[in-house]
Image: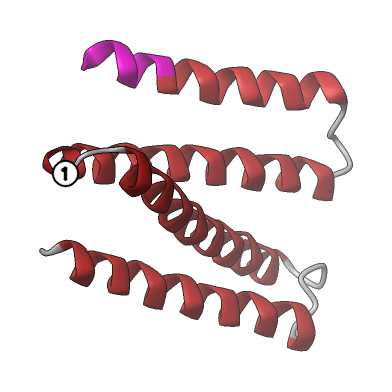
Amino acid sequence: MALKGYLWLVRIISLFSFFVLVFIITQIDPEKNWQSKMFFFAAFFFALCGVLNLFFLRLRRKNMREEMLGENIILSFRQSILLAILATGLLFLQSLRMLAWWDGMLVMAGIFLVELYFLSRE
């Protein structure tokens, strides 16, 4: 898939996820049952993942050469997923009223270790 096609696909999915997130917040009470809470966190994850992916790709395209573009797409995708997992995990812990600063640091350290594992494999 060409870069423009990939970027348009990510934009469309992010926009759709954002609209689903707004719909869930305005029309459905996420606190009512566990299904609506699950849909809220899934929509939040996909919207944030897409926005972060586009942000990281834009940063890397400005600073890197064109021949490293494929590697940058994979790196941006992985890092956006990890940061979206971090934000969604912290939001989930906060929704359960279990988030303290040490819990946030543990989640962040876990995500950091996963990223270090992927970087050491390359």
The answer to whether 5 is drawn above or below residue 51 in the figure is below
Closer-to-camera residue (110/4): 4
Q: Does the magenta-highlighted stretch encompass residue 17?
A: no
**Residue at 43 percent of width and 37 percent of height:** 79
Q: Secondary structure at mark 1?
A: helix
Q: Quadrant of residue 76?
A: top left
**Residue at 47 percent of width and 53 percent of height:** 55
Reading the image, the residue beneath label 1 is 70
Q: Does the magenta-highlighted stretch encompass residue 118?
A: yes
The answer to whether 29 is drawn above or below residue 88 in the figure is below
Closer-to-camera residue (7/58): 58
Residue type at mark 1: give it: Gly
> Does 105 sit left or right of 85 as displayed?
right
Rendering colour mode: secondary structure
> Does 37 sit left or right of 62 as displayed?
right
Image quadrant holding the N terminus, namely: bottom left
Q: Position of residue 39 (x, y in %)?
A: 59, 68
**Residue at 45 percent of width and 60 percent of height:** 50
Image quadrant holding the C terminus, namely: top left
**Residue at 61 percent of width and 17 percent of height:** 109
Q: Position of residue 35 (x, y in %)?
A: 64, 69
Predominant secondary structure, magenta span: helix
Q: Position of residue 23 (x, y in %)?
A: 67, 85
Residue range (magenta): 116-122
Q: Position of residue 48 (x, y in %)?
A: 55, 57
